[in-house]
Every structure is written in structure tokens, then in C-alpha cells.
Amino acid sequence: MARKIKNRGEVLAWSMYDFANQPFTNIVVTFIYGTFFTTVIASDEISGTQQWSHAVSITAVVVALLSPVMGALADRGGYRKSFMFGFTWLTIIATTVLYFVMPGEVFRALLWFVIANVGFEMGSVFCNAYLPDISHSKNIGRISGYGWSLGYVGGLIALALAMVFLVQTDTPVFGFGKGEDAAYENIRATNLLVAIWFALFSIPTFLFLKDRKPDKKALMNNVKHTLKDFRQTAKEMRSYPQILNFLLARLFYNDGLVTIFAFGGIYAAGTLDFTFDEIMMMGVILNITAGIGSFLMGFLDDWVGGKTTIKVTLIGLMLAVVLAIVAPTAVPWLQYVLGGSAVPESLTAKNIFWGAAILIGVFSGSNQASSRSLMARFTPEEKKNEFFGFFAFSGKATAFAGPLLFGVLTGLFDSQRAGILVVFFFFFIGFILLHRVNEDHGIEQGESHDVNQEVEIDKSST
């Protein structure tokens, strides 16, 4: 039976961080700036795809190195909110600078994108670490789903504003120029929208999400002991085999998600000739379907468990990748199979890819939400930040592999279709490895600290 959410104000404040940061993923990483980089800033789409893959890979390596150590420091000194605030503003500043990058300035664009992306990913590490504080094992799936679904609402609204006032309009707001003669100022201005949005809507999180005060006087001592704590936690992880099994599986399937997010719009533009307007519309559809999927499958998570929910999402994502790969040649192949007979006019390469995009939307957000809730079920109360640092580490330790292989295969075969094939194998390996995870053990462990959480939440609601 699902447990009621008694601390709704705090849950909403926490969820607002997803609402605030999701436009960065949508507009900068996936649908606008990434595509703008490969089609305008870079010399050509193939080399641009390779260069973008290197930037995403560098981000993954940096976050993989930083997240466990920073998590350990946050655990010891109570710096969770301070670190989240700092990385949030790192993202805001770097994203603002992207507006000033001109076509042809490849290195400058990639440098500031990496800085912004590192800040975004690290801020998410500390946001995720709050989940065990504000939830119970009986409602953790719903709360995680609320955060992701609210995030997609934020991404959808920001994307719609970018479409209406900057990208698709003949007269962009505030006098931003449009087209090559104006150095695509209206496209670059979408970065300013992301920065302002993040700064504004993250305020409730920092004001109303509760945290213990940092021990500033002991900062240097904390830094001194952080690496020691990190090594100790790495040893302690051996006592949590279900966490290790889960993180190993996530290490693979999250690589697939990272690659899709980094190259979805780029693939649509380069392989299927999607226009900027079509890519923007795809972003809107993906956010709607992702928000609905995250919300509804949060209930499935609480009903059947995180492991089963994740496996369902991986099946959907593998089907989506297959559709994306076959889309460019599906119609000629069907005509050949049918002996030259005509196929329905609605069955076009772009429409097949639209089907893949909808599946990705429905299952990508719910996959991330259920992964977060399953990790929280397994996490000991006293090691929240540190273990969620490892959670981020598992998502980034090899996350360079997917984008890197995408770029290598795209360049080797001069085709983005060859690159996206690697995504299917990451999802498949993650699906197989999930069989080793015993979620019942994690639920029992989660219940062991639910009692204390319930007392704290009841007190805060009186």
C-alpha cells in the first residue's frame, strides 16, 4: 500500500530543481545547441558529430572523477546544498557565455559546453542525494517520478518559449537577429533563456529544501579526511552486493541514454534531414511523452518495484533504437518485400522516426526516475551523498564510451546510423545484467531507516 506524502512542501521544493535544470538538457544538449554546433559552428556534420562526442565524453570523465569525492566531502561536512548551489551557478554562467560564441569558434563552444555540462551533472548528484531524506520505501518511486515529470514540464515550457519567441518567429524578441547574416543570434539566445530559467526556478529549492548547516570551521580537516572516507566507502560497497549489481547494470544502460540525449537531435538533422523547426517540435513531443511516462510509471515503480520498471523501459528503448536505425531505409525495404507494391503514404522515414522518438520520450524519463528510486531503496541513511556519488560515478565512469563510439563509428563508416547502433547494445547489456539484482533485499534495507524518516517528517508537518 502506497504511503501518503506528508512533507509535500519539501517534495515540491526538491522537484523544482528538476523543473529548473531540465531546459539545459533539452535546449543545450539535445535539441537546439547540439544541433546548431554540428550544422553551423562545426565545419561539417560528420566532424561536428565527432567533436561533440568528444565534449560529452570529457564531461563524463570529469564527473566520474569528481562525484564520489565531492559526495564524500558533502557527507562529512554538510556541504550538500552549498555544492549544489555552486555547480548550479557554474552551469548558469557557462551557459550564458555560450551565447557569445560565434560560428566557426569550435574550441570555444566545446570548452564552455563542457564546463556548463559538468556543473549540470554535478548539481544533479547532490539533488538526487536528497531523495532518501524526503521519501519512504513505499512512495519513493512516486516522488522520484514527480521530480522527473515536473522536470519535463519545465523543459516543455522552456522549449515552447524558445520556439515561439526565438527560433520560429520572423521577429525574435529583444531584437535578436535571425539567420546567417546575424550569426544566428536568435539560436544562440536560447542559451540565455536556459540560464535565466535555471537561476529563477532553482530559488525555491535552495530556500525551502532542508539541510543541516555546513561545518565551515572544519573545512580543511574535512578535505583532509575526504579521500580516506572515499577509500573506506569503496571497501564498504563490497558489503552491498545489490548496489554493486545495480550500478554495474546502470553503467551500461545509462551510456545508451547519454548517447541518445547527446545525439538525438543531431541524428534527426544529419540522417533524416529534420529542420530546426521539426527538431523543436520533436523536443516538445518528447517532453510531453516523457513527463507522462515519468508520472505514470512512478506508480508502476511503487507497485512492481524499480527493477521490473527499469526492464520494461529498456525493452521500449531498444525497440525505439531499432526503429531509428531502420527508418531511413524502411520504405524501400518494404516495397521490395511487397514486390514493388505501394506502401501507405503515411509510412515515411520521418514518421517512423517520430514513432521512435515517442517511445524514447515515454521510457527515458521513467527509466531515470526508477533508477534513482531503486538506488535510494538500497542506500544506507548515513551514506546518502557518498553512495549517490557512486550512483553518479556509475552513470559517468564509462559514459564517455557511448558518445565516443558513436563519433568513431560515424566517422569510420561516414554514417550516423552506424554510430547509433552502439546504443542498442548498451541497453541490451544493461537489461541482461539487471537479472542479478535482488530488489527485495534493498526494500528490506530501506525499511530499516524508514521509521526514523517518518518521525522526522511527522514533526515537520506539525
Image (cartoon, rainbow, N blue to C red):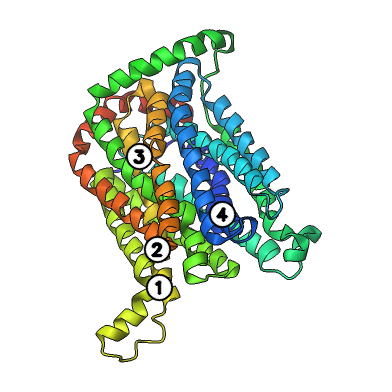
Work out whether residue 239 or residue 384 is closer to the camera in this orientation and state it: 239
Please tell me whether residue 361 is drawn above or below residue 343 in the rendered image. above
Q: For the N terminus, give its image quadrant.
A: top left
Task: Look at the numbered discs 1 and 2 and tell me whether their residues touch, using CB distance below 8 Å.
Answer: yes
Q: Residue at x 38, y 46 (%)?
A: 255
Nearest to viewer (mark 3 / mark 1): 1
Q: Alpha carbon of mark 1 to alpha carbon of mark 2: how far?
A: 9 Å
Place of residue 81 in the rendered image (x, y in percent of width and height, measured from the top left): 55, 27
Please tell me whether residue 227 is drawn above or below residue 15 in the rendered image. above
* Chain-order first, disc 3 or disc 1: 1
Nearest to viewer (mark 4 / mark 2): 2
Place of residue 308 in the rendered image (x, y in percent of width and height, measured from the top left): 24, 48
Task: Look at the numbered discs 1 and 4 and tell me whether their residues touch, using CB distance below 8 Å.
Answer: no
Task: Look at the numbered discs 3 and 1 and tell me whether their residues touch, using CB distance below 8 Å.
Answer: no
Name the outermost residue toward the right: 175
The three-letter amino acid code for the residue at tag 4 is Gly
Q: Residue at x 29, y 18 (%)?
A: 235
Q: Alpha carbon of mark 3 to alpha carbon of mark 1: how far?
A: 37 Å
Residue underneath mark 1: 328
Q: Alpha carbon of mark 4 to alpha carbon of mark 2: how far?
A: 18 Å
* Chain-order first, disc 3 or disc 2: 3
Residue underneath mark 3: 373
* Chain-order first, disc 1 or disc 2: 1
Residue underneath mark 4: 34
Q: Which mark is residue 391?
A: none
- Quarter residue 7 falls in: top left
Work out whether residue 18 or residue 143 is closer to the camera in this orientation and state it: 18
Q: Alpha carbon of mark 3 to alpha carbon of mark 2: how far?
A: 33 Å
Residue underneath mark 2: 417
